[in-house]
């Protein structure tokens, strides 16, 4: 798994579902998109939709002040989807065993959350569910 940080929150993404990591230089905003949609990043003839991860994951906490202080350095690409999560810092990669996760029921609220990594106290992202929600234009609370 890859551990990364956004606005003081640590998230984990399975390496098998990681489409790549790119440095964020310029993001081109698009009008008429949800507040969590930061814009499009062009990288080697590829277009990636950039998610303002803090606003998407924690919309109730992502006040304007937090949004202004969040400095995205990297884009964590979700599989082959063309979606990427803005990330402030990369922490590490680790091997994760199934019993190291407190698993959640996907049918519950926040289907994008597979569970919590016990020893790291961080959220493990369910990449297919996350992509599905993004494709539908949904935020974490929808």
Image (cartoon, helix red, strand yellow):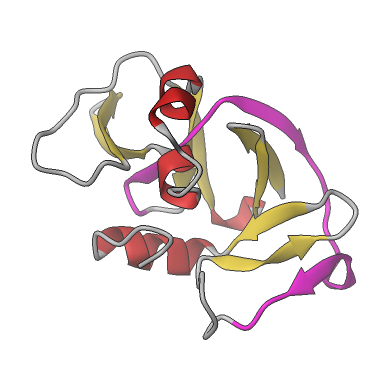
Q: Nearer the viewer, residue 58 or 104?
A: 58
Q: Is residue 80 left or right of residue 94?
A: left
Q: Is residue 114 visible?
A: yes
Q: Is residue 132 left or right of residue 34?
A: right
- The structure residue drawn at horizontal position 51% and vertical position 43%, both measured from the top left corner, is 61
As for residue 62 lying within the magenta part, the answer is: no
As for residue 86 lying within the magenta part, the answer is: yes
Q: Position of residue 29 (x, y in %)?
A: 19, 27
Q: Is residue 85 visible?
A: no
Q: Is residue 62 left or right of residue 118?
A: left
Image height of 103 relative to 2, above or below: below
Image height of 34 relative to 16, above or below: above
Q: Nearer the viewer, residue 22 or 12?
A: 12
Residue 89 found in image quarter: top right
Q: Position of residue 141 (x, y in %)?
A: 41, 63
Q: Position of residue 2 (x, y in %)?
A: 69, 43
- The structure residue drawn at horizontal position 51% and vertical position 76%, both measured from the top left corner, is 109
Q: In this picture, which residue range is highlighted in magenta? A: 81-105
For the C terminus, the image quarter is bottom left
- The structure residue drawn at horizontal position 50% and vertical position 25%, both measured from the top left corner, is 74
Q: Position of residue 55 (x, y in %)?
A: 41, 42
């Amino acid at each position: 798994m890859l551990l990364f940080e956004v606005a003081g929150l640590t998230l984990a993404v399975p390496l098998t579902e990681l489409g790549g990591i790119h440095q964020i230089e310029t993001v081109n905003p698009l009008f008429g998109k949800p507040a969590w949609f930061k814009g499009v990043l062009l990288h080697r003839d590829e277009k990636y939709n950039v998610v303002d991860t803090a606003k998407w994951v924690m919309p109730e906490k992502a006040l304007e002040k937090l949004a202004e202080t969040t400095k995205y350095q990297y884009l964590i690409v979700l599989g082959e989807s063309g979606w990427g999560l803005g990330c402030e810092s990369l922490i590490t990669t680790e091997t994760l065993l199934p019993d190291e996760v407190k698993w959640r029921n996907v049918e519950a609220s926040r289907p994008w959350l597979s569970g919590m990594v016990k020893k790291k106290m961080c959220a493990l992202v369910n990449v297919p569910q996350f992509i599905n929600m993004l494709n539908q234009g949904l935020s974490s609370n929808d």
